[in-house]
Image (cartoon, rainbow, N blue to C red):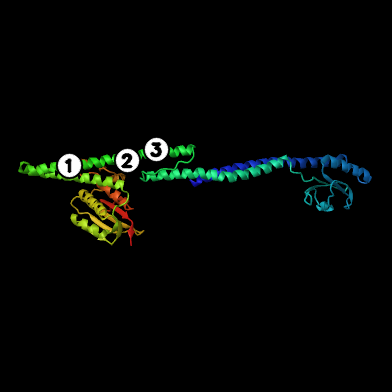
């Protein structure tokens, strides 16, 4: 956004500079044309009106006076030996003749034009410094105007872009999941209207998301009551239900109960962006406790992170359950350590068929299942979504990587202490 601010401000300055240069160039061309006219008139005077060498001084003086009136310039005629023969206007120092070649000669009072005659005489014409004419006044006025606009445009351009920066910041906050992000409305122009539209859209999105979460949480909570009743009815049925059927019903009830628990946990994590209970958690020991339930091997080094132990335990458990579900009869491998930037790292590897690169990000979406999983009844589609939610609520993240020799590696990186 700072580049936009610079573009606006520098464009204004560039336009003003171009205008001043253009006007100055026109004035300069006009001034040069005046000098060209004077030189041309002096050449014509030498060719036709200048008395020859040896003419009386009075005659030569009258001719020089006429050229002075015609050009409104200082004129001096020198003999070959440097003697002043005639002059009109302000005196021109003899040093003006020291140049060997004809042309412009610098000196006090401004530059002069030196013309060598064939008889050895020299004619010097010096145009007086032009007073500050309307064109010069215009240039000065434009310069002052450019300076005033440059100074005044700075706070205007900065104020405009600062409001756009705040709007950009609000959009980024909303994009990162902060549904309470709003932008302060300043003024009554198009930027203010844009900020107001953004605030209305953000409020509507927040309302819709809250309604969705509340509906999901309430439905999940209400489902527990009929599940409890079904479980009690199954227990009271006794031997009237076939053992195989009873076990299948118990399994279905357990899956539904787990699904409801995961939905409620996901809703709570969405509502609370930070862990509710924070303490030092030794991840290697926590992973070893959970891995023992799945006969999984654990290796690595000690790594301590700040967070909620129950949520971190649930995260590791979900990773192990996922690895066990898709890894077949081979137990998963767990490794705990630190990354190159000293963050805590947990990796769980399975021996399953692996996950295609196009699916490695989508599997962290709620209720997304790999092709064929829904038909076989594998998982609810919330386990890995909860893994990423828990990791991000603790300032980290979770990714899926390919494993050497087949299978998948799920890596969770968290801020470490110590």
Q: Which mark is residue 209?
A: 2
- In which quadrant of the rendered image does the C terminus lie? bottom left
Location of mark 3 (residue) = 200
For image coordinates 67% across by 42% down, the residue present is 141
Comparing 266 with 14, the one in front is 266
Does residue 377 appear to the left or right of 391 in the view shown? Answer: left
List x then y, in percent, for residue 264.
Answer: 24, 45
Residue 149 position within the rendered picture, expressed as x and y whole percent measured from the top left: 60, 43
Secondary structure state at the residue bearing disc 2: helix
Numbered badge on residue 159: none
Sequence-first tag of 3 and 1 = 3
Q: Earlier in the sequence, mark 3 or mark 2?
A: 3
Horizontally, is 117 left or right of 281 in the view?
right
Label 3: which secondary element: helix
Alpha carbon of mark 3 to alpha carbon of mark 1: how far? 39 Å
Identify the residue position indicated by label 1 in the image.
225
Kindly state the secondary structure of the residue where label 1 is placed.
Answer: helix
Residue at image position (24%, 50%) is 318
Q: Is residue 182 visible?
A: yes
- Say if residue 121 shows up in the picture: no
- Residue drawn at (30%, 46%) of the image: 271
Q: Nearer the viewer, mark 1 or mark 2?
A: 1
The residues bearing labels 1 and 2 have C-alpha atoms spaced at a distance of: 25 Å
Residue 325 x/y as whole percent: 20, 48
Compared with residue 332, is residue 248 higher up or lower down, i.e. above or below?
A: above
Q: Alpha carbon of mark 3 to alpha carbon of mark 2: how far?
A: 14 Å
């Amino acid at each position: 956004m700072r580049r936009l601010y610079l573009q606006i401000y520098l464009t204004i300055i560039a336009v003003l500079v171009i205008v001043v240069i253009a006007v100055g160039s026109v004035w300069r061309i006009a001034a040069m044309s005046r000098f060209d006219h004077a030189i041309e008139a002096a050449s014509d005077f030498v060719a036709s009106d200048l008395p020859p060498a040896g003419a009386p001084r009075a005659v030569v003086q009258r001719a020089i006076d006429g050229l002075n009136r015609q050009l409104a310039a200082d004129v001096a005629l020198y003999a070959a030996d440097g003697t002043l023969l005639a002059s009109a206007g302000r005196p021109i120092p003899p040093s003006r003749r020291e140049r060997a070649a004809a042309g412009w000669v610098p000196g006090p009072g401004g530059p002069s034009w030196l013309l060598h005659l064939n008889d050895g005489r020299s004619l010097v014409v010096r145009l007086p410094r032009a007073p500050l004419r309307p064109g010069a006044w215009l240039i000065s006025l434009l310069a002052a105007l450019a300076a005033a606009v440059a100074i005044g445009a700075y706070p205007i351009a900065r104020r405009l872009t600062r409001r756009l920066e705040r709007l950009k910041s609000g959009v980024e906050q909303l994009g990162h999941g902060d549904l309470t992000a709003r932008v302060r409305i300043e003024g009554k122009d198009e930027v203010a209207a844009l900020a107001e539209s953004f605030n209305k859209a953000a409020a509507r999105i927040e309302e819709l998301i809250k309604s969705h979460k509340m509906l999901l949480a309430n439905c999940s909570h209400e489902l527990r009551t009929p599940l409890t009743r079904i479980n009690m009815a199954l227990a009271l049925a006794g031997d009237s239900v076939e053992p195989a059927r009873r076990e299948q019903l118990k399994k279905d009830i357990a899956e539904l109960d787990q699904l409801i628990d995961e939905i409620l946990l996901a809703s709570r994590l969405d509502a609370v962006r930070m862990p509710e209970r924070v303490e030092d958690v030794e991840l290697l020991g926590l992973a070893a406790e959970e891995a023992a339930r799945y006969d999984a091997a654990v290796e690595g080094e000690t790594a301590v992170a700040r967070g909620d132990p129950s949520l971190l335990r649930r995260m590791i458990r979900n990773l192990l359950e996922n690895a066990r579900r898709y890894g077949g009869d081979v137990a998963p491998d767990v490794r705990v350590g630190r990354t190159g930037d000293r963050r805590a790292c947990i990796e769980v590897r399975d021996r399953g068929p692996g996950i295609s690169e196009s699916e490695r990000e989508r599997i962290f979406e709620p209720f997304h299942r790999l092709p064929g999983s829904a038909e076989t009844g594998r998982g609810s589609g919330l386990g890995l979504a909860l893994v990423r939610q828990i990791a991000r609520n603790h300032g980290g993240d979770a990714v899926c990587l390919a494993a050497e020799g087949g299978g998948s590696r799920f890596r969770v990186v968290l801020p470490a202490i110590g």
